[in-house]
Image: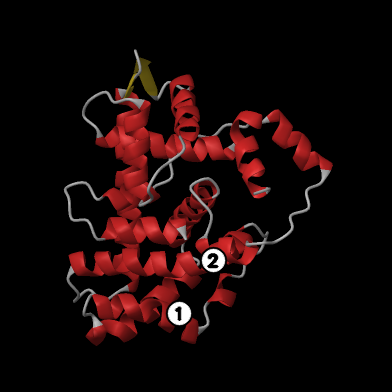
Amino acid sequence: QVFHRLTRKMSAMDIELDQKDLVTVNLKYGSSTKPLKTLAFAQLAAKALYLQKRPITAADVAADVARLIGVGTISAHLIEAGLEYLQEIGKARNNLGQWVIREEGRQEIGRTIQQTTEHLGQVLKKHFPSTMDKKELRKWFLEAESEFFGHFGDEWVCELSKEQPDRKKLLHRRTVDELLMPSIRRLHLEPFSKPLIEGFIQFIASEDAGDRQYLMLISQAIFSARLVAADIGADPISLQELKDATLVLDTNVLFAIALESGHLASAIKSLGG
């Protein structure tokens, strides 16, 4: 749900820098020695610093990240780990507790946003009516992709992990209609409903290199959102389903809890009432 929530939240904002473009863009901060979760929060921290024109504290970064992805709070230790990694790779610097993105890092994010925006423009030009207002079409597409991939996120990542992914298996016309029509109605685009839905299906099923590259960007955003979701709070539905349940933990989990007592012990202890 995090991908769906952050994309819906940002697509409704009309500012000079479209923050949705910033949130969903994938920054290539790869490392074989860092947990993927650290890399995901490093991306979010970098984006928060990118939006600021002045040095800010780690607490300010955490607050900005929470606003970016539409949640109440973010754990400080996750943001601190992300900031430390950014400092380690030379993307940010810390001066007496005040964090700022380095110019090289700022330019890199700007270039990535520009490239992603160009990919999106090519997708819209290729698959959707040229008679539509470009701003309205773009706004709808950002909402539509968040609806579609918010629903099919897990299945989509699984399909792309295969040697021969079958993306078309997700394209049941009735399901696609049900997912896309709410945004079409919300933006009063009913006269274009048929070409919008058909164009979206063509885009998902496309073998064009440019389309596939943009789909990969979306997939990376989904995967990053999954990593973030694991630490910003449990799904209320899952909480209800697990209420009064008996949890059985094997010794490997218990050892991990003991080793990470500062982070997990209080949460586990609360399970015992």
Would residue 46 appear left or right of 219 to someone viewing this image?
left
Front residue (pair 249, 58): 249
Q: Position of residue 66 (x, y in %)?
A: 36, 44
Residue 57 sits in quarter: top left
Q: Callout 2: helix, strand or loop? A: helix
Q: Residue furthest front?
A: 273
Tell me which residue sits at (25%, 65%) in the image.
Answer: 139
Number of other residues with Cα within 10 Å of mark 1, as a class: few under 14, some 14 to 19, many 20 or more: some
Q: Which residue is mark 1?
A: 176
Q: Is residue 48 left or right of 13 when viewed as pictured? A: right
- Given residues 15 and 257, the one toward you in this image is 257
Sequence-earlier tag: 1 or 2: 1
The residue under label 2 is 237
Q: Residue farthest to the right?
A: 251
Task: Tell me if residue 167 comes above or below residue 254 in the rendering.
Answer: below
Mark 1–mark 2 distance (CA, rounded to whole Å) = 24 Å
Q: Residue at x 33, y 66 (%)?
A: 143
Q: Position of residue 202 (x, y in %)?
A: 43, 75
Vertical arrangement, residue 172 with respect to residue 268, above or below = below
The image shows residue 247 at horizontal and vertical percentages of 74, 55
